[in-house]
Amino acid sequence: MVSEAKRHRFFNNVPGLKRRNGNHTRGRQSLRLDDLPDDILILVLAQCHVDDIFALRLTCSIFRDVFSTYSAHIIPAVARCTFPRSGLLLDPQTAPVGYTLTWLKDRIPMQLAAILVDRYRIIYEEELVGFRLGIPAEDALGSELRTRVGTGWRILRRLSNIAKEVYYLDAKEILSLLQKKTSWLLAHTSRYETEIVRLREELILRRRLEYAGSMSIREAQDYVITFTLLSGAWRVSKSDDPSTKHHPTWPFDFGHGIDAPRTIRKGESWVTWFILHLGPQLFWEQWWLLPAEAPGTMNHVRECAIEAFFAPLGPKDYAPNRGDGFVDPHEDLHNMQRQCAEKVQRVFYEKSGGRAQTMHMMYFRKYFQQRGPPNRAPAMEETMGSVPFFINFSAYECADDATPSVD
């Protein structure tokens, strides 16, 4: 449905084009796609972003055939249209076997890596750490770290796809795969849905742990590095800061998010489960796909997280700016999700050897030694300044005689 909707929105912006279902766009004279020569279709595809290409290939056989035939010419144009200022990302050396669809798809995790490594410096820009954190996206000295973070994003995507695959399964398939009997569930219909969710998460956890077990030590380190950097994007500011008055309070865990990055890294926060479940897509949307100037872009990930957390609740219970006095009526579900996420994170941290959480600092220190004083290099072009990087919340601070009630 999403791909079909994207296709129709795209077609509606092409004057004089008639869709196969007979709906017309602007103009009195309409053409069918069949009537357009390949040259025109190539020009149309060359103006698409990468997500448009994926959608059109899935929903329109004509565009799919043209793309397959002329992909060597279309793919570089699509990449330039999607990443207009990302020179290193589109360097011909990144496509040793030519511009393929696999190469184009891989630009997404690599762009997310470039954003994360670049924007990490603004997380601690007000703190004195002795050297510069983060590496500009267009500085070749950051290529090794960006490659490792790109691998981490791919691993996260696979962990998310495991969840999607399991949730696509019918309940009977879940019971069969876990060798569970249906008699108890049928006798307790009031708990049927809850138990099926628990079994789905059990199967997801099993498959994720098997996948983690197949990782090399370096791949596990890449994942830990990526998650460490990513956790810093979740920013929880003090509630007495005037700039945070419009930010909702942190509703997900005990402690109101005061130590959110650490708990997210360790898997102790419900947010870890949310990230594992949905994967890189939400960050791709907020950081790059959606228009940066659009009102909803800056808070896209945050609003999706809040909606997912409160999805089982009725509208009267949904008040993310509540502060204290809220008891999670789905505490058992959320605790179970936290426990599953924590087990996944622990396996990766143990396999990485325990040093990966600080490994990114080695790259930043090395970069500062080569680019900082006294060998100060010319400033690199700023290409990520407009990226809405942070996921912002405010921290509710209880009165002295109050007790936090969330979780």
Image (tube, rainbow, N blue to C red):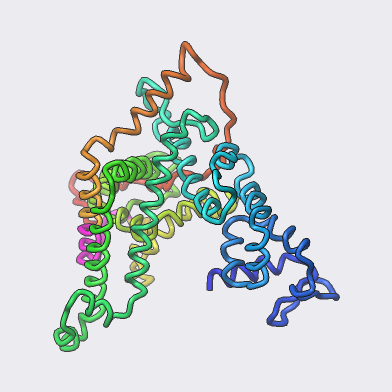
Left or right of residue 268: residue 27? right
Please name whichever residue, 15 or 399, is drawn nearer the observer in this view of the structure: 15
Vertical placement of residue 120 versus 55, above or below: above
Vertical placement of residue 349 versus 203, above or below: above
Residue at horizontal 39 percent and vertical 27 percent from the top: 364
Is residue 214 visible to the viewer in this orientation of the structure?
yes
Q: Is residue 338 magenta?
A: yes
Residue 305: horizontal and vertical position, in percent? 38, 58
Tally the numbered discs: 0
Vertical placement of residue 133 versus 394, above or below: above
Please name whichever residue, 170 or 220, is drawn nearer the observer in this view of the structure: 220
Residue 70: horizontal and vertical position, in percent? 68, 59
Residue at horizontal 62 percent and vertical 55 percent from the top: 49
| Residues shaded magenta | 323-340
Left or right of residue 40: residue 235? left
Residue at horizontal 45 percent and vertical 19 percent from the top: 370
Q: Is residue 365 magenta?
A: no
Residue 47: horizontal and vertical position, in percent? 69, 55
Identify the residue at the far front of this view: 97
Residue 245: horizontal and vertical position, in percent? 43, 46
Identify the residue at the far top of this view: 374
Please name whichever residue, 354 or 188, is drawn nearer the observer in this view of the structure: 354
Is residue 313 visible to the viewer in this orientation of the structure?
no
The quarter of the image holding the C terminus is bottom left
Identify the image quadrant of residue 64. Answer: bottom right
